[in-house]
């Protein structure tokens, strides 16, 4: 979620600005995020801040007088389309919530309230309550909450009561994997609108840029969707369970082909996702072992291909890159992406990020309504959805573009948008060669994204 301000009056009247960071500092001082030099605007006038635990934006008055919808406030939770006035008779702004592709968030207190309302209205009792809450946790929570909330409860006294009742009424494995029902019609509509905007932007770009055109038409076919499902195996050989149901985690990422012999580059955290989660690592520390029950790569025009765990090669340092291999004959028609292995020039240049941000949500948004309803009606798993989308030729990566803003020995920063599902995708430079492997969102520095220079991935390839 990002804050967006439409300037209704004042020196920037008519401008709409979307701010990349979770905090927008408003005032007349030059160091503010939203600089508004107008009579009555204090140097440090007000601040808008995203509160993650509540999934809401808060507006706080600093040194200036602030009105929201005509009422003077000290601090208030902002809603979409709220009108902000900086000082009596001062500049007026329209606040809007910009939702990046696939982003969803719902505070826990709202999940609990909604679950109670559904149960009370539908008469479904505890089953309706737990299903509604479970669905919200899986679809509306932040990624950290989706994983961390259930696992944090595993070791607590609360487990025997609330969590026991929650899991006792449902098939955990089946519920976690009913992915076609995990995206609402409104979410799909929003995603489709955003994807159309992205396509329009890419089409505008490729009309006057041969490099962008080559990436869109050729190199993007060498970028795959990585889909993984893992469980935790106990020392006695049985699966780690919660109330008799095997714990299972499912995710998606990206990768790209780099050799004729079928080597594919991605992130280490795409092939070892549990390393990035403290809660899961805490459970692993008790002696259980993570084990994939499914790991595949799907390229445009191809059906999913199993990834052999023994083909995975990881870096042993902190750099977030890894390589796996698929037999070359299975990748017939898939291009080998060109790599920029010479020293990078430390200057601003264009960056193109290619990958599968937001995973299944973005893919389902591309599906036609008939396919989508078919997936919903049979409670399709993510594997089912990927298989059917692949058969329909609807597996294709998203392309975003921006500017390389900073070069460091071990990291490249750029402004091209991406989200968690885009991890492991290639970052192309101005010459049309891969300069980095996308791996993180640098939230504390203006929303920039980060990539590992491609030479560190190349070091994992056979000589």
Image: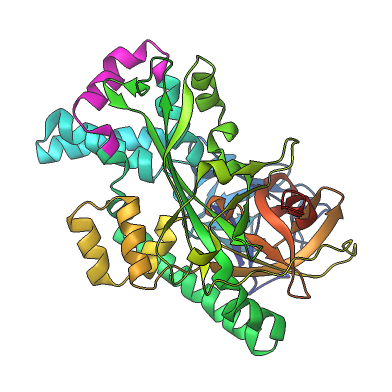
Q: Position of residue 330 (x, y in %)?
A: 48, 64
Q: Residue furthest bottom?
A: 207
Q: Nearer the viewer, residue 168 or 10?
A: 168
Residue 459 relative to residue 291: left or right: right
Q: Position of residue 161 (x, y in %)?
A: 27, 14
Query: What residue range appears in magenta?
Result: 154-173
Q: Quadrant of the C terminus?
A: bottom right
Dominant secondary-structure state across the stretch colored magenta = helix
Is 277 located above or below residue 284 in the figure?
A: below
Classify residue 435 by image quadrant. Answer: bottom right
- Residue shown at 50%/15% (left/top)? 287
Classify residue 270 by image quadrant. Answer: top right
Classify residue 406 by image quadrant. Answer: bottom right
Q: How is the image coloured?
A: rainbow
Figure disc tally: 0
Residue 98 appears in the picture as rendered: no
Q: Is residue 162 a member of the stretch shown in magenta?
A: yes
- Residue shown at 55%/50% (left/top)? 420
- Residue shown at 29%/36% (left/top)? 173
Q: Nearer the viewer, residue 300 or 187?
A: 300
Q: Is residue 47 a member of the stretch shown in magenta?
A: no
Is 187 located above or below residue 52 in the figure?
A: below
Q: Position of residue 202 (x, y in %)?
A: 59, 78
Q: Nearer the viewer, residue 138 or 426?
A: 426
């Amino acid at each position: 979620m990002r804050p967006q301000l439409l300037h209704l009056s004042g020196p920037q009247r008519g401008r709409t600005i979307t701010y990349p960071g979770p905090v927008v500092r408003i005032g007349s001082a030059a160091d503010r995020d939203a600089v508004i030099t107008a009579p009555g605007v204090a140097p440090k006038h007000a601040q808008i801040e995203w509160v993650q635990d509540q999934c809401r934006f808060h507006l706080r008055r600093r040194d200036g007088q602030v009105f929201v919808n005509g009422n003077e406030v000290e601090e208030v939770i902002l809603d979409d389309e709220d009108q902000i006035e900086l000082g009596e008779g001062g500049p007026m702004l329209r606040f809007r919530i910009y939702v990046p592709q696939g982003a969803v968030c719902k505070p826990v207190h709202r999940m609990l309230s909604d679950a109670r309302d559904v149960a009370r209205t539908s008469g479904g009792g505890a089953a309706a309550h737990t299903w509604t809450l479970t669905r919200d946790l899986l679809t509306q929570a932040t990624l950290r909450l989706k994983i961390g909330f259930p696992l944090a409860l595993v070791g607590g006294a609360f487990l025997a009561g609330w969590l026991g009742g929650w899991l006792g009424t449902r098939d955990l494995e089946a519920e976690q994997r009913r992915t076609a029902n995990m995206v609402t019609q409104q979410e799909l509509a929003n995603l489709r609108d955003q994807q159309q905007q992205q396509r329009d932007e890419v089409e505008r770009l490729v009309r006057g840029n041969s490099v962008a055109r080559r990436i869109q038409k050729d190199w993007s076919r060498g970028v795959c969707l990585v889909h993984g499902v893992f469980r935790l195996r106990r020392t006695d050989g049985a699966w780690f369970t919660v109330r008799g149901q095997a714990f299972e985690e499912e995710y998606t990422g990206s990768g790209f082909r780099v050799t004729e012999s079928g080597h594919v580059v991605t992130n280490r955290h795409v092939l070892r996702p549990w390393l990035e989660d403290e809660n899961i690592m805490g459970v692993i520390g008790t002696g259980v072992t993570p084990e994939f029950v499914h790991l595949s790569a799907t390229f445009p025009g191809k059906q999913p291909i199993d990834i052999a765990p023994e083909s995975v090669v990881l870096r042993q340092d902190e750099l977030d890159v890894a390589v796996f291999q698929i037999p070359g004959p299975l990748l017939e028609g898939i291009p080998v992406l060109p790599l920029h292995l010479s020293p990078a020039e430390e200057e601003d240049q264009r960056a193109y990020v290619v990958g599968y941000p937001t995973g299944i949500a973005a893919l389902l948004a591309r599906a036609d309504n008939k396919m989508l309803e078919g997936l919903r009606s049979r409670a399709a798993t993510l594997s089912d959805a990927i298989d059917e989308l692949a058969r329909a030729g609807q597996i294709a990566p998203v392309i975003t573009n921006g500017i390389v803003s900073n070069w460091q020995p071990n990291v490249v920063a750029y402004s091209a948008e991406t989200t968690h599902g885009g991890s492991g995708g290639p970052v192309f430079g101005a010459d049309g060669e891969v300069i980095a492997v996308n791996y993180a969102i640098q939230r504390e520095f203006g929303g920039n994204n980060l990539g590992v220079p491609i030479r560190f991935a190349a070091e994992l390839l056979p000589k």
